[in-house]
């Protein structure tokens, strides 16, 4: 286990190096950060001086080496816009994004398993057809449309829920969360549903098809033939095996969810790191962009590592170390 | 006093305290949503709409623009021109900074010196030599030569508390230093004279302002005690927040939502002709065709800019035939949009381009209202006179470097004059480009006309307003006749507010609402 984690750590370092190199090499294509720092009438000459002062005129390798030296000390550069270390800015925004992802994951866990299993067991039931139809719609409608529709229905027309922002937050152990107050939860409802609307249908469909496959498998027939109760056959024999691929794909999906937070947060003015990232791109705030990509890369590596560990727990045939136990 | 009586009094006091928040007129809070929040608390760090909005909340200028584009006295109670090169300002007495200090002419001189040091603001004060302190309440602004825009510039002087910015901060850096990148004392701390103080600020999330009780302007009708400013970047979300009552005041309202906001029974919509001109420039250096005034005129005649305003901008703009909007010194009302396709084709034929030619065009897609759509429409209109346009649109961050390179034959540029003065447009957009003087910095068309250049330069030292206005009108007429650029429209301003929030009295074309004077029912 320890060797496995150590190897993962090594991989993570390589992944982040590659990400930093890639994001560094595209920074010239992102535009000129100076324009966002100065007014319209500032002369070309003054802008050139500033560019020189900020080291933007240095050759690519010099800039990259400077970045790497800083990164070794945990310094990923200073955001042009926030004027604070990029990593601090991201860590400030992280709790809001985690709240959102947790809430969306809650909806997904709450609905995907019962609906998916039900649809697999009763494929011809009207509810199964409805759920499949809705999930097709959910997959194909872009998240920002869902979000705007929800805002107009529940905030503007009905006036039940707030239209933007995070509301009241409380701090526990230095972690600022909106999950503990009524106001915070009300603010969280629409964004989390929007975010879940993209991923939930995938899970429902996946669980349904894996479960259907499992129900056809030999060991399920055998279990039935043994005379086991149908409930036990479904939940213990079929469903447990359904979970294996779901966990693998699910881990990747949680990573993908981070990408969808960019759109969801932008529409809801959610002060998380997805919204921050889009803004950083608009402003060509390169240090922040690079730092964000590195942090997200790290999140992917961590999620995949956790998935592998969980996979090992669910499926005893898998050995993380790759050696016989 | 018996114990019981004391207890009863305590109870009564408690009851009053509890009831206070519900009493009419108590603690009005304004929830405000703009598309962006100020980038810094240092009002001299960046010259932008956001900074000026902040300046008018936390500070007061010597004098400020009113709704008729004239000037109202603020920290200067009156002012007079004493010679062609000097204007004397008499400062209001008893004006207090948020720190409690009383403002004097020394603070104005300090602020003036700081403006001269600011990369963004020094351009406005380039013609000024010094701010000479006469006594505690009198100060002279001295210019290098006769200068007509002293008042226009004084509207940018928001006196800062010189004692507050004196000395070093905890890290040994000068507190008054203006830092463009990286943090500084001044970018997170401010002491000024304005109606509000900054209570808390979380950049990009929210800024909370609290009324300053020591504000000098006791006659102000304003009754807002607290302002919570939230930047809401996305247009649909900002409009939804306004319509759902989550915010009391939102700006800007995008063209697509104007009708919806106007229809709403809960919300008032206020629109005003803006002062930002949107234009296309035709690069004569890249394309010899554009050096022929007939071709440029043909292009102007081929573009139905009134149609663009109606269809694409949903009437959220005013079709233009010159740079200066109404109310500016150089505005000439006789110049009208001149869409005429027949004439455009005739001009093309006359110039020998009846069969047309192909050009490249670039425009941003997130800088001006509907910028990319406007560029597409213009490309379509040029096809009618057989000019084939290869159009590229891109985000502003990528666009400006392209603009600096003059990377396409036709490029879009919008311009707002910082000083609300006509000459500024021509200085940046139409004068002969000159690296030394900085004139024509945004003239990607390379249009050059010696008469225009000399008129604008002369206008900079003409202190008779009528003579000066005529010079600037003449400039507009020449540019019109020469078809120096393609004028499209002036972008409108639009603000939305909940009924009972009387923003109509505090907004103006300068787009810095005077929230200190805002009345809420």
Image (cartoon, helix red, strand yellow):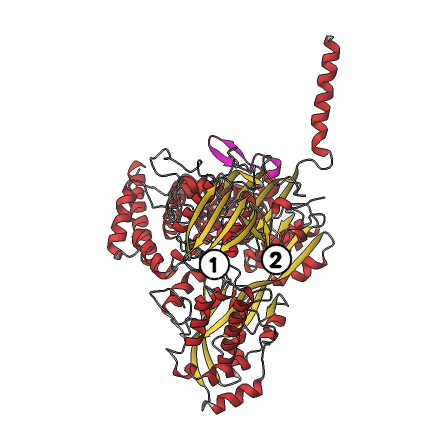
Q: Is residue A182 magenta?
A: yes
Q: Is B411 on the left-hand or right-hand side of B473?
A: left
Estimate the x, y position of residue B262 in percent, counting from the top left. Answer: 70, 59
Q: Is B216 above or below relative to A293?
A: above
Residue that appears at 51% across and 32% down: A171
Of residues B383 and B501, which is closer to you in this image?
A: B501
Residue appearing at x 30%, y 36% in the figure = A2
Q: Is residue B153 left or right of residue B219?
A: left
Q: Quadrant of the N terminus of chain B?
A: top right
Q: Which residue is mark 2?
A: B253
Q: For numbered disc 2, what is the local secondary structure?
A: loop
Q: Is residue B413 magenta?
A: no
* Vertical comparison of B260 with A309: above or below: below
Label 1 packing within 10 angstroms: few (<14), some (14-19), many (20+): some
Q: Which residue is mark 1?
A: B84
Q: Chain of mark 1?
A: B
At which x and y percent is residue B505?
Answer: 67, 52
Magenta residues span: A168-183
Separation of marks 1 and 2 at Cα, in angstroms = 43 Å
Q: Quadrant of residue B22?
A: top right
Is the residue at mark 1 from the same chain as the one at mark 2? yes
Q: Residue shown at 60%/76% (left/top)? A: B334
């Amino acid at each position: 286990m320890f060797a496995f984690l150590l190897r993962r750590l090594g991989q993570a370092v390589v992944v982040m190096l590659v990400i930093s190199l890639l994001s560094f090499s595209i920074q010239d294509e992102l535009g000129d950060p100076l324009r966002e720092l100065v007014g319209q009438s500032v002369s070309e000459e003054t802008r050139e001086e500033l560019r020189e002062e900020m080291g933007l005129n240095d050759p690519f390798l010099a800039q990259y080496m400077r970045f790497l030296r800083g990164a070794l000390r945990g310094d990923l550069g200073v955001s042009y816009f926030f004027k604070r270390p990029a990593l601090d800015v991201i860590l400030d925004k992280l709790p809001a994004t985690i709240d959102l992802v947790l809430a969306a994951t809650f909806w997904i866990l709450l609905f995907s398993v019962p609906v998916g299993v039900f649809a697999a067991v009763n494929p011809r039931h009207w509810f199964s057809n409805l759920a499949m139809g809705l999930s097709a719609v959910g997959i194909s409608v872009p998240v920002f449309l869902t979000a705007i529709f929800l805002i107009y229905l529940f905030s503007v027309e009905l006036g039940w829920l707030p239209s933007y922002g995070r509301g009241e937050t409380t701090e526990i152990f230095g972690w600022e969360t909106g999950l503990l107050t009524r106001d915070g939860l009300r603010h969280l409802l629409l964004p989390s549903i929007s975010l879940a609307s993209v991923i939930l249908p995938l899970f429902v469909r996946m669980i349904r098809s894996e479960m259907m496959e499992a129900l056809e498998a030999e060991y399920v027939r055998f279990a039935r033939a043994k005379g086991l109760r149908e409930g036990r056959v479904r939940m213990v024999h079929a469903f447990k095996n359904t979970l294996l691929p779901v966990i693998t794909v699910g881990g990747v999906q949680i990573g993908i969810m981070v990408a969808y937070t960019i759109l969801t947060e932008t529409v809801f003015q959610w002060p998380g790191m997805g919204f921050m990232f889009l803004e950083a791109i608009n402003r060509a705030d390169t240090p922040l962009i690079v730092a964000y990509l590195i942090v997200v890369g790290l999140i992917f590596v961590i999620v995949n590592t956790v998935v592998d560990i969980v996979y090992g727990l669910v499926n005893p045939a898998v050995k993380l170390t790759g050696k016989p136990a | 006093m018996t114990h019981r009586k004391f207890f009863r009094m305590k109870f009564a006091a408690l009851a009053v305290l509890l009831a206070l928040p519900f009493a009419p007129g108590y603690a009005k809070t304004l929830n405000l949503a703009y598309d962006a929040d100020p980038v810094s608390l240092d009002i001299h760090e960046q010259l932008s709409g956001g900074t000026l909005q902040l300046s008018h909340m936390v500070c007061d200028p010597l004098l400020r623009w009113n709704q008729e584009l004239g000037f109202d006295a603020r920290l200067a109670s009156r002012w007079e021109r004493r010679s062609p090169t000097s204007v004397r300002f008499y400062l209001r007495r008893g004006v207090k900074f948020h720190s409690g200090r009383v403002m004097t002419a020394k603070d104005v001189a300090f602020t003036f010196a700081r403006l001269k040091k600011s990369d963004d603001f020094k351009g406005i004060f380039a013609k000024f030599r010094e701010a000479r302190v006469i006594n505690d309440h009198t100060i002279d602004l001295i210019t290098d030569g006769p200068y007509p825009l002293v008042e226009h510039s004084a509207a940018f002087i928001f006196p800062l508390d010189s004692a507050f910015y004196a000395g070093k901060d905890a890290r040994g850096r000068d507190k008054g230093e203006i830092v463009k990148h990286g943090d500084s004392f001044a970018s997170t701390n401010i002491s000024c004279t304005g109606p509000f103080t900054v209570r808390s600020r979380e950049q990009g999330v929210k800024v909370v302002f609290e009324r300053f009780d020591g504000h000098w302007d006791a006659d102000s009708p304003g009754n807002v005690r607290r302002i919570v400013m939230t930047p809401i970047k996305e247009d649909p979300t900002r409009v939804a927040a306004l319509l759902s009552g989550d915010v009391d005041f939102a700006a800007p309202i995008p063209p697509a939502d104007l009708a919806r906001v106007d229809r709403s029974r809960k919300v008032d919509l206020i629109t005003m002709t803006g002062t930002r001109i949107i234009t296309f420039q035709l690069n004569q250096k890249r394309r010899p065709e554009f050096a022929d005034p007939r071709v440029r005129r043909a292009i102007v005649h081929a573009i139905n800019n009134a149609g663009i305003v109606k269809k694409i901008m949903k009437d959220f703009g005013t079709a233009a035939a010159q740079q200066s909007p109404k109310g500016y010194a150089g505005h000439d009302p006789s110049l009208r949009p001149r869409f005429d396709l027949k004439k455009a084709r005739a001009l093309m034929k006359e110039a020998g381009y009846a069969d047309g030619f192909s050009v490249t065009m670039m425009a941003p897609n997130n800088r001006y209202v509907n910028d990319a759509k406007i560029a597409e429409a213009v490309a379509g209109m040029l096809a009618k006179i057989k000019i084939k346009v290869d159009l590229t649109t891109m985000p502003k961050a990528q666009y400006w470097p392209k603009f600096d390179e003059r990377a396409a034959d036709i490029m879009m540029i919008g311009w707002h004059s910082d000083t609300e003065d006509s000459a500024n447009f021509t200085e940046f957009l139409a004068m002969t480009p000159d690296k030394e003087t900085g004139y024509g910095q945004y003239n990607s068309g390379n249009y050059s006309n010696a008469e225009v250049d000399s008129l604008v330069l002369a206008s900079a030292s003409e202190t008779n307003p009528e003579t000066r206005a005529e010079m600037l009108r003449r400039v507009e007429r020449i540019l019109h006749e020469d078809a120096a650029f393609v004028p499209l429209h002036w972008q409108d301003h639009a603000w939305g507010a909940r009924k009972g929030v009387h923003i109509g009295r505090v907004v103006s074309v300068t787009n810095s609402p005077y929230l200190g004077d805002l009345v809420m029912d």
